[in-house]
């Protein structure tokens, strides 16, 4: 029979992790579905009573999103336009019920290829802060998720926060998710884009990530480089070529064929670029 | 599970303290420790939202919330949303709009909506969809829920009351609706919570396997709290069941070999704590996987494993209908079209998994389960227990959706055997996965059809071959094999016709009854080909259908000629203006270069569906009595699974008696108390049980008139304990206390039985299979995103001839809900055994997938039906998928013949069309 611990201080949680083998519980939106009707045999470390792990704050160099930050917190917090893609993804996570419970750290640690939060966080250059007894370390999100349901988290660590480096106020973002129904749907493919134009409208920074089309969501580096110096305006998607998505390795499953995923990934990239290049108020 | 902790929190405003395991799901804490069973469990995985509660005002799924996490917080459940017993405006609005059908999702809907309304008093449609999108409903098609929530904040409409003789046709609230919106309705999982042993079933992990059970006695003794392990050896009677007695072939517990994944081999019975702590991985059974088949093609191969010795070639049943001469017919053709079509397994996906309880009362067994067929269940359970049917009392709970699957036995035999053997109350609740993996499905179909018409656009021949995968056991397979050839023509005159359907066994899940018994599948082939045929002849697709539609005096393919009641042509004609407007609207959209990449289309489909069993007796009996205290009691055994039978039958009966429905009390669905009203299937309850209720009402009325010695047109009323009859001669007042009454206090009892007149089908399928059909026509407007292959439905228009709309709100509910299931069939649903046994891989439509639905009710009365009414429940679904597929083809030229039309398939079909156009040199 496992134990259950619900510490109120991060230090206590870390001390527990150091001393025993724990399954970490937060929003429960991945833990309970996977449990089915099996009895719970593992020891559970419930982090939800630790206030310092939740919430979004401005730091000197960017933004800190506590690991327990929920999708609803993301939606309801006033953030720069570069976060619009992350907010759009948050609204597409399952349902309001799941957005109210599910956490950013949980989404990342669950490491599903179809995790809605990962592509926009990749385009925000998110860094993962892992706390362990006596310290913490940071690494880029892209390095943290190492495969399907695999991360670089050690058993005595927990994801205490995500750090998003500052982006120029001109930064804009978008997110598109394709599913076979409107709500409560696991994506067939999704694309997140962040671009930063200079004051003349020339792109000085471009980040594009595709999810659900490879074991871990991927950035499209070649396309990003090609977009530098282009004008952020209608027609930007003409810069996309079929080879841009060639590094993706989508699978065949009940949600779509791999061929279809390659096909729509390219289309979604184009649309996400158009969306971000032509903000709503400028669109016809 | 770890040691209990002391929790204190606010529950519906009351300080609450309770001891519970900290990681226990909040659903279990609320339902089992605190008695708040209004919070429902549909999936235990956040996929359905039925368990939605508010924590500090925010909706969350209680099934994914650790109990420890509510410490110090405020939890609101459905029980907390009505104040001092008064329904909230939201609840009143839900009731008024008919937004609750079966009621199982209703608490989750209302709780979610309450959170929305707290922030946004007058929400837009999109706001409602976003706020409630996490709750699935399989009955309503969501439209009425949207209306109810949008209207809720200033809802002030008093419930409509029925005047004497004016209940039929009135939009009365459901007679059983208040419990549904309060969350007090009792479903299968809501009973016996504190007194019963629990049961868990050990099931096969393979599509086919042999197995050996180990030391079961040791398993029992080594698991404290486990009382027994039940296997085939523990069955007192026969280890066999099946809804059609001559085809009964399914064991309660497999013996030696399992024929499909999730087939039961044993059941473990014990205390709830012991059963919940079980990890069935250590159950003593050794499996040996065996070669299996999953499709008819595999199963019909010479070397294929044979499922049942008496059915060589795995052929379960065959049905056929022939008329005229198809060779001659095809020789007269100016145009011929043909095609192959296929559909997969479709899951009913009601939000209530199968559940119930049973107890032994001396030499009788009482079983309370969610079911569509109490009397059939009774007889099957009696045979399993080897007792007389009268020793079994089936008391249906409320049914949280059925759609055909809850006709068959599921939990019943396990409950019955355990309660009978152990003499203690037992209960069980299927998990979502168990429900999806082990119960029946819609038959997968492979259909080849060829249809021809003359230059004038008259249908002259049709050939139809359907192969239906009936899975491991027969269930309702024979019904599908019989119904399909009768219906495959659609509601059209086809003089030369040859249709056959066969049911073939495989090691797939058992295919059974699902809204339409194979007819939705056959209509996809027939209606898709009709569009191609009309196009070939350059005839408007609607006019082509009208030109061939059945009407009074025109024979069906079984040679049946109706001289009344056939509304097929009228339904299609009703669409004429709408069709033209919709076509023009789509054309102007498509002509706008700004809409490049998006194509709009309009699709049509006709439909017909026979009400009641095919050429077989299916009587219903209803009783209605007047008590000495001046109350009418309706004894109604027609199970309401959400469609509204309780209300419709009461409306019919009230008008037949001539007294308002408010004078009635109800005794529903109990094999000890209500007569057999047949099963809730085949769209027969309004038509057949409704007619029985009409006859019962008339019978009671005659007796009441006799008391007063007044003429038949006299007006009746009940005033206190007096029966008052008024006619031309004045008012007669009869004191009921002065009349003789029976031992139950009834001064008069009316009885009505109805069995619709049919005749057997001959060797060519000729005859009168149904006393009446219902008819309809649907039109779909949609938009295709050509690059992604996604479909956006814009509007459904559904015209249905219901004979007489007993309750228009309930009719609309059937139309919207049936259409939603048709949308699922067309666009997203396919059950894959072992892969999509949950509600996130098996997708059903959500709030955002159902467009505006315009219901057009047509009333072409049928002389058999009560007040002219016909059935509707299954009809709706028949036309929806074909109309969607035809609209996709209209928009893009792409024909989807292998369902569902998921985005990848639609995209591939569009690419194929574009490739063909390029190679043809056209653009």
Image: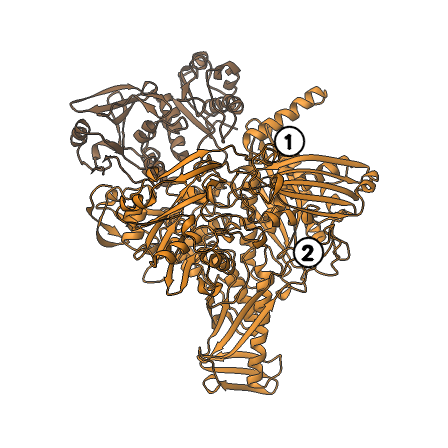
Chain colours: A brown, B orange
Q: Toward the viewer: B362 or B325?
A: B362
Q: Toward the viewer: B893 or B151?
A: B893
Quarter placement of the N terminus of chain B: top left
Position of B766 relative to B913 (above/below): below
Please indicate, yes or no, whether residue B391 appears anywhere in the rendered image. Answer: yes
Position in image of residue B327 (x %, y %): 81, 40
Q: In this view, does B232 lie to the left or right of B3?
A: right
Which residue is label 2 attached to? B769
Position of B415 relative to B455 (above/below): below
Which residue is label 1 attached to? B892
Q: In this view, does A184 lie to the left or right of B547?
A: left
Chain identity of mark 1: B
- SS at mark 2? loop
Q: Toward the viewer: B649 or A57?
A: B649
Q: Residues within 10 Å of mark 1 (few under 14, many from 20)?
A: many
Position in image of residue B155 (x %, y %): 43, 57
Chain identity of mark 2: B
- SS at mark 1? helix
Question: Looking at the image, is mark 1 or mark 2 earlier in the sequence?
Answer: 2
Cα gap from disc 1 to disc 2, whole angstroms: 39 Å
Position in image of residue B353 (x %, y %): 43, 48
Quarter placement of the C terminus of chain B: top right
Position in image of residue B375 (x %, y %): 51, 61
The mark found on residue A93 in the picture is: none
């Amino acid at each position: 029979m496992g134990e259950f611990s619900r510490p109120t201080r991060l230090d206590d949680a870390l001390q527990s992790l150091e001393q025993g083998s724990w399954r970490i519980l937060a929003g429960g939106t991945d833990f309970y579905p996977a449990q089915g009707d099996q009895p719970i045999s593992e020891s559970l470390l419930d982090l939800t009573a630790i206030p310092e792990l939740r919430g979004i704050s401005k730091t000197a160099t960017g933004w800190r999103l506590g690991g327990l930050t929920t999708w609803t917190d993301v939606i309801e917090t006033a953030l720069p336009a570069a976060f619009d893609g992350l907010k759009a993804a948050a609204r597409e996570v399952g349902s309001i019920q799941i957005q109210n419970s599910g956490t950013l750290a949980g989404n990342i640690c669950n490491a599903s290829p179809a995790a809605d939060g990962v592509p926009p966080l990749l385009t925000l250059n998110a860094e993962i802060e892992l706390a362990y007894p006596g310290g913490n370390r940071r690494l880029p999100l892209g390095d943290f998720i190492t495969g399907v349901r695999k991360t670089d988290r050690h058993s005595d660590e927990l994801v205490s926060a995500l750090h998003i480096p500052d982006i120029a106020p001109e930064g804009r973002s978008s997110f598109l998710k394709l599913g076979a129904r409107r709500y409560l749907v696991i994506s067939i493919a999704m694309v997140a884009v962040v671009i930063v134009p200079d004051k003349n409208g020339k792109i000085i920074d471009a980040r594009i990530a595709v999810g659900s089309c490879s074991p871990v969501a991927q950035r499209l580096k070649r396309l990003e480089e090609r977009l530098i110096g282009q004008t952020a305006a209608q027609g930007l998607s003409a810069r996309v070529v079929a080879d841009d998505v060639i590094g993706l390795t989508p699978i065949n499953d009940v949600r779509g064929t791999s061929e279809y995923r390659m096909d729509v990934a390219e289309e979604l990239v184009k649309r996400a670029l158009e969306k971000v290049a032509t903000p709503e108020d400028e669109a016809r | 599970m770890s040691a209990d902790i002391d929790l204190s929190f606010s529950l519906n405003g009351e300080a609450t303290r309770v001891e519970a395991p900290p990681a226990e799901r909040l659903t279990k804490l609320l339902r089992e420790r605190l008695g708040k069973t209004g919070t429902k469990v549909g999936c235990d995985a956040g996929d359905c939202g039925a368990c939605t509660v508010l924590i500090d005002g925010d909706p969350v799924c209680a099934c994914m919330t650790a109990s420890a996490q509510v410490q110090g917080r405020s939890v609101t459940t459905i029980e907390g949303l009505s104040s001092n017993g008064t329904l909230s405006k939201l609840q009143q609005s839900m009731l008024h709009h008919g937004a609750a059908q079966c009621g199982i999702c209703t608490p989750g809907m209302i709780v979610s909506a309450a959170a929305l309304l707290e922030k946004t008093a007058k929400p837009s449609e999109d706001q409602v969809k976003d706020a409630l999108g996490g709750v699935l409903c399989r009955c309503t098609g969501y439209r009425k829920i949207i209306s109810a929530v949008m209207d809720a904040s200033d809802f002030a409409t008093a419930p409509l009351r029925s005047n004497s003789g004016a209940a039929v046709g009135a939009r009365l609230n459901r007679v059983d609706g208040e419990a549904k919106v309060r969350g007090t309705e009792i479903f299968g999982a809501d009973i016996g919570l504190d007194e019963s042993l629990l049961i868990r079933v050990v099931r096969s992990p393979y599509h086919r396997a042999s197995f050996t059970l180990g030391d079961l006695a040791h398993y029992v003794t080594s698991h404290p709290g486990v009382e027994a392990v039940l296997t085939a050896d523990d069955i007192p009677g026969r280890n066999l069941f099946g809804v059609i007695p001559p085809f009964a072939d399914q064991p309660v517990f497999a013996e030696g070999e399992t024929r499909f994944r999730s087939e039961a081999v044993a059941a473990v019975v014990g205390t709830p704590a012991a059963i919940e702590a079980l990890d069935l991985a250590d159950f003593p059974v050794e499996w040996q996987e065996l070669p299996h088949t999953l499709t008819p093609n595999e199963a019909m191969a010479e070397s294929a494993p044979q499922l049942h010795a008496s059915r060589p070639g795995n052929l379960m049943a065959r049905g056929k209908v022939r008329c005229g001469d198809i060779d001659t017919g095809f020789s007269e053709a100016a145009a011929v079209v043909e095609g192959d079509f296929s559909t997969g397994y479709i899951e009913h996906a009601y939000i209530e998994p199968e559940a119930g309880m049973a107890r032994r009362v001396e030499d009788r067994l009482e079983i309370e389960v969610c079911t569509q067929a109490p009397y059939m269940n009774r007889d099957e359970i009696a045979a399993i227990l080897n007792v007389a049917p009268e020793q079994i009392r089936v008391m249906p709970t409320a049914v949280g959706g059925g759609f055909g699957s809850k006709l068959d036995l599921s939990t019943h035999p396990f409950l019955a055997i355990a309660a009978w053997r152990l003499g203690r109350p037992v209960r069980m609740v299927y998990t979502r996965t168990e429900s999806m993996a082990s119960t029946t499905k819609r038959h997968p179909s492979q259909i080849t059809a060829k249809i021809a018409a003359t230059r004038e656009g008259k249908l002259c021949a049709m050939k139809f071959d359907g192969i239906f995968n009936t899975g491991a056991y027969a269930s309702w397979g024979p019904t599908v094999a019989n119904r399909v050839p009768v219906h495959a023509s659609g509601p059209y005159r086809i003089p030369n016709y040859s249709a056959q359907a066969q049911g073939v066994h495989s090691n797939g899940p058992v295919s059974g009854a699902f809204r339409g018994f194979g007819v939705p599948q056959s209509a996809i082939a027939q209606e898709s080909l009709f569009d191609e045929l009309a196009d070939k002849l350059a005839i408007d697709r609607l006019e082509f259908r009208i030109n061939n539609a059945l009407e009074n005096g025109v024979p069906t393919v079984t040679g049946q000629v109706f001289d009344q009641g056939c509304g097929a042509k009228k339904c299609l004609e009703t669409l004429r203006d709408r069709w033209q407007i919709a076509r023009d609207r789509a054309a102007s959209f498509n002509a706008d270069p700004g809409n490049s990449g998006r194509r709009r289309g309009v699709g049509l489909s006709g439909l017909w569906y026979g009400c009641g069993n095919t050429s077989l007796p299916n009587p219903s009996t209803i009783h209605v009595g007047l008590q000495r205290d001046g109350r009418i009691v309706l004894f109604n055994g027609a199970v309401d699974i959400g469609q509204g039978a309780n209300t419709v039958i009461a409306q019919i009966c009230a008008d037949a008696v001539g007294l308002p429905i408010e004078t009635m009390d109800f005794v529903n669905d109990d094999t000890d108390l209500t007569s057999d009203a047949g099963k809730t299937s085949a769209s027969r309850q309004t038509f057949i049980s409704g007619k029985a209720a009409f006859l019962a009402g008339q019978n009671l009325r005659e007796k009441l008139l006799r008391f007063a010695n007044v003429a038949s047109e006299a007006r009746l009323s009940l005033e206190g304990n007096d029966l008052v009859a008024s006619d031309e001669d004045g008012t007669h007042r009869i004191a009921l206390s002065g009349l003789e009454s029976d031992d139950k206090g009834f001064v008069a009892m009316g009885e009505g039985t109805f069995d619709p007149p049919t005749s057997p089908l001959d060797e060519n399928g000729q005859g009168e299979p149904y006393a009446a059909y219902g008819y309809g026509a649907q039109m779909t407007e949609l938009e295709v995103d050509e690059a992604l292959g996604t479909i956006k439905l814009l509007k459904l228009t559904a015209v249905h001839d219901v004979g007489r709309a007993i309750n228009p709100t309930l009719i609309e509910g059937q139309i919207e809900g049936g259409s939603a299931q048709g949308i699922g069939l067309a666009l997203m649903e396919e059950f894959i055994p072992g892969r999509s046994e949950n509600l996130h891989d098996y997708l059903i439509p959500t709030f955002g997938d159902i467009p505006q639905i315009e219901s057009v009710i047509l009333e072409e009365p049928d002389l058999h039906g009560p007040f002219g009414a016909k059935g509707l429940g299954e009809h709706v679904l028949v036309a929806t998928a074909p109309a969607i597929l035809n609209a996709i083809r209209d928009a893009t030229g792409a024909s989807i013949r292998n369902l569902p039309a998921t985005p990848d398939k639609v995209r591939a079909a569009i690419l194929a069309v574009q490739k063909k156009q390029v190679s043809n040199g056209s653009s």
